[in-house]
Image (tube, rainbow, N blue to C red):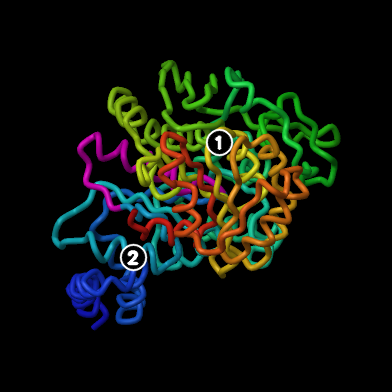
Amino acid sequence: MSKVKFYISLVLARFVYLAIRLLSKSSGTSFVGMVVLRLCPNFLTYCQKYVKKTITVTGTNGKTTTSGILAHILEEDKNNVIHNLKGANMLTGVANAFALNLKPPKIFEYAVIESDEAYLTKLYDYYCADYLVVTNLFRDQLDRYGELSTTASFIQNAIDKNKELNLILNADDPLVANFGKNREAIYYGFEDVEFISDKHNSSSLAPSEVFNCVCGEELKYGKQFFAQEGHYYCDKCSYKRPEPNIKAYAKVYDNYTDLSVAFGNNNYEFRVNLVGLYNAYNALGAISAALVNEIPYKKIKEAVESYTSIFGRTERRVINGHNTLIQLIKNPTGASEVLKTVDLNSNIIVAINDNYADGRDISWLWDSDFERLKDAKNLVITSGIRAKDMAVRLKYAGIPQEKIIVEENIKRAIELASKAENNGESITILPSYTALLEITKMKF
C-alpha cells in the first residue's frame, strides 16, 4: 500500500506545484514536500531506487554554495542530477526536490542533497547516502541549535546511523575533522593561503572564540586562516590537523580566488569566480567530492569557472539599473567574513529579520565585525523586522548616526538605495535568511 502511495504522491506533487505557482502562494521549495510526506511518510526511502549515488552536504556555512558547485560539476559531466537547488534543506525541502524531479522508471546518476545539520539524522532515518561532505561548524542560531557541541552531536548521530557512509571532511576545522577520528575519511584543506587583496587579509575586530581539543586543552595554531580554520595541534595529546588527501593553495583576490589543488599524483588549477576565502573553501569541498567520484579534471575546471552563485550567496543582480551584490549573513563568523568583502563605496542595506528560520536570538549581531562599515562613503540603510536593533549596532560600530537610515520595509529600502539620482552607484545587500526570501520574490 505504501508503494502505491509513493506513486500517487509523485502525481499529486505536479498538480500541487502547478496550483501554488498559478496562485503565487509559495516559492514551491517545501510545500510540495510537506504534502507528499503527509501522504507517504516513507517517500524518501522509495526515492533511493531511482538514484545510483547520493552525496549529502551539511555544515553551518557554505552548504548551498558547495552543493550548488558540485551539482553544476556533475551536470557539466552530462549526469542527470537531483538537487535541492534553492537551499530548502529540511525533510520537506529534500522531499520537494525528489517529488518534482523523479520520473519513474528513469534513473538519475546522482542526487546532491544539502541538509540542515539538525535534520541530517532524520534524513538518514529514511535515506542512506553514499557520501557526506561537512563544510565547517560555527556558532549559529543558539536558540535553535544550542552550542557547537550540540550541533556536532546532531551530525555525529547521523554518521553513526550510516556505517557505509563515505566522509569528505574539512581538515582545517577541528570540529569537523573529529568526525573522522574513529573511521576512514577523505580530508581536504589548505596548505597555505596568500591574500592578494588587503581587505580580505585584514584582521577582524569580531570577538574570537577559544577552541579546545577533545582532551580539554586549548588548541594551538601553526597557521590560522579565519575563525578556527587552520593548522591546529594540541600540546597535551596527539590530536592535530589530519594530513589532507586533497591539498590546496589559494591566492585570494578582490573578486576571485585562484586554487592549486593536489590529489594523488596530479596537480590541478582552478579559478573560483566568487569573493572571499570562505567561498574558496566551498569550492574546494565541491572539487574534492568531484575528484573522489572520478569526474574528469576538464569538466570540473569548466564547471567551477562557469559557476554563477544564486539565491543570495554572492548573488549578482541588476536592480533599477544598479549592479547589486546580495550576500546572506546569519551568524558571527559568516557575517564577519562577508563584511571583509563589502565595497564601502556602494549603497549598503542590512536587512535583518528574527523569524524562526533566522533564529529569534539576534545577539549574534554584536559578535559580528560591523565595524568594517564605519568608513562607508554613502548612507547605510537598515531594514527588516529588526531594523532599529541593527541601526543601534551600527551606531556602536562607529558609523555616524546621520549616515544611518532606518526603513523597515525591505522593498522601500532597496528603492531608496536605487534612486535615479544615485545612478551608476552599486548596491550591497546583506540580508538574513527570511529577508533574503522576501528579496528573491521582489520585482523591480
Membership of 66 in magenta stretch:
yes
| Quadrant containing the N terminus in the rendered view | bottom left
Report the residue at 56% width, 69% height from top.
355
Residue position for label 2: 27
Residue position for label 1: 278
273 or 300: nearer the viewer = 273
Report the residue at 39% width, 53% height from top.
113
Membership of 263 in magenta stretch:
no
Query: In terms of image quadrants, where is residue 239?
Result: top right
How far across and how far down the image is residue 444, in percent? 34, 53
Give the foreground label among 2 and 1.
2
Q: Are marks 2 and 1 in contact (CB under 8 Å)?
A: no
70 or 381: nearer the viewer = 381
**Above or below: residue 11 compared with residue 352:** below
* Dot 2 or dot 1, earlier in sequence: 2
Q: Amino acid at mark 2?
A: Ser
